[in-house]
Image: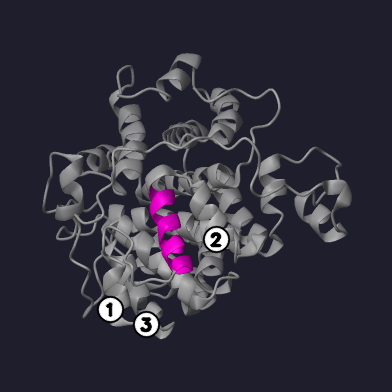
Amino acid sequence: MLRPLVVTCSIAAVAVTALAAEPRLLPVSTGAFNDEQRALAATYGATFGTGGDFRTLLVHPELVKGVLPFANYIVAESTLTPRHRELLILRTAWRARSDYLWVKHQRRATAAGLSAPELSALTERTVSPRWDSFEANLLRAADELHERSFIGDETWRALAGRYSVHQLMDATFTIAEMTMIAETLNSVRIELEPGWKGFGNAQAARRSESRTHTPLVRPRVEPVVLAQSTAEIRTMLDPAGSGRDIAGVYRTFARHPKLYVPRQILSEYIRTKSTLSPRIREMLILRIGWRCRSAYEWAAHAPAGRRAGLTDAQIRMLASSGYDGWNAADAAVVRAADELFDEDTISDDTWKALDGQFDERQLLDVLITTGGYRMVSMVLNTFGVPAEPNSEPLP
């Protein structure tokens, strides 16, 4: 694997040095595409683009098939206006200190009507008074979701005053999905395209000390009731017609069928098709779920972790600070989830430790698994999806 030129000793320094360091994974050269990669570029390139971000993901074609359907939905097909979509994406890119994502969408934002002063205002620590009240609340939603894995009541009520349920869901998923993309690009250190210039303000988006939220006592987005649903929704949720119980997370997301289908592709990729072992996958999911304070994710995946080989003691360790009790390889996995949550990137020392045990495809799967379940945790917290009855409580 590639080794970065700049080695840092602390997580706090990562955001600054990563901007000047060499890529950790080399993108596939356009001239070196095989038939499968050319087909993927034809399928997804028009919306996602075929820059360094796409070509780095193309190192792992199965990941592209799993990740980009939902990314393309968020970028181009959601119910949000192009202007609101780009406001959320750019604020998230700045919050996550992702130069590449910022510049890529700065161009799209300009096409959507954002002015140069508005673009500049998106990089101010507090929400500028230049925004109208609704757009100011959109930006606060991005800030709150990034900070606390939850959109606060006041902000949610303001958005709900104008947005439909589908738009509320799309706005939340836009922030959460772009957080996953940003931290992936940051961690593999995508180089800016020729002629691109980043926002150059890596320290401006430092997080506050408060990272918690108060769980909702009732859902903001009500799950569908199967008996009252259309035949199309029932088939979507239970393709085999088994009549089985459908978990609340799926019935909640089914409120928005157009979103449900591509998001489910991402979910199934992470759970059933990635190159990670079940044990590593569940370690990452449980750690990021605990860091996001997602009761639903913890309840769903603590039993899955045990089935994957984690002991009760190790599951308790995943819900505690520090890395005592883990061997060096496992500690690196847990530390990677923490660093992605805390800093939206993986430090040099941790990347080196991961690089010693995983190949390129597995490294990308570490990022997408952690980012994908951070996304889901953010959304479940914000929608108020309750844990299933009699499930294991969040430690």
Mark 3 or 1: in front is 1
Say which residue label 3 marks: 110
Residue 304 locus on image (x, y percent): 58, 29
Residue 347 locus on image (x, y percent): 23, 43
Residue 320 locus on image (x, y percent): 38, 22
> What amino acid type should be assigned to the residue bearing mark 2?
Leu
Task: Read off the magenta span.
Answer: 133-146
Residue 248 locus on image (x, y percent): 70, 41
Whether tag 3 and tag 1 are in contact, CB under 8 A, the answer is: no
Q: Which mark is residue 159?
A: 2
Quick one: label 1 or label 2, which is nearer the N terminus?
A: 1
Q: Is residue 145 magenta?
A: yes
Mark 3 or 2: in front is 2
The residue most toward the top is 313
Residue in view at x 59 percent, y 44 percent: 272
Secondary structure of the residue carrying numbered label 1: helix
Quick one: label 3 or label 2, which is nearer the N terminus?
A: 3
For the residues marked 1 and 2, what is the alpha-carbon distance in whole angstroms? Answer: 24 Å
* 369 relative position to 250: left or right: left
Residue 14 seen in the current view: yes
> What amino acid type should be assigned to the residue bearing mark 1?
Pro
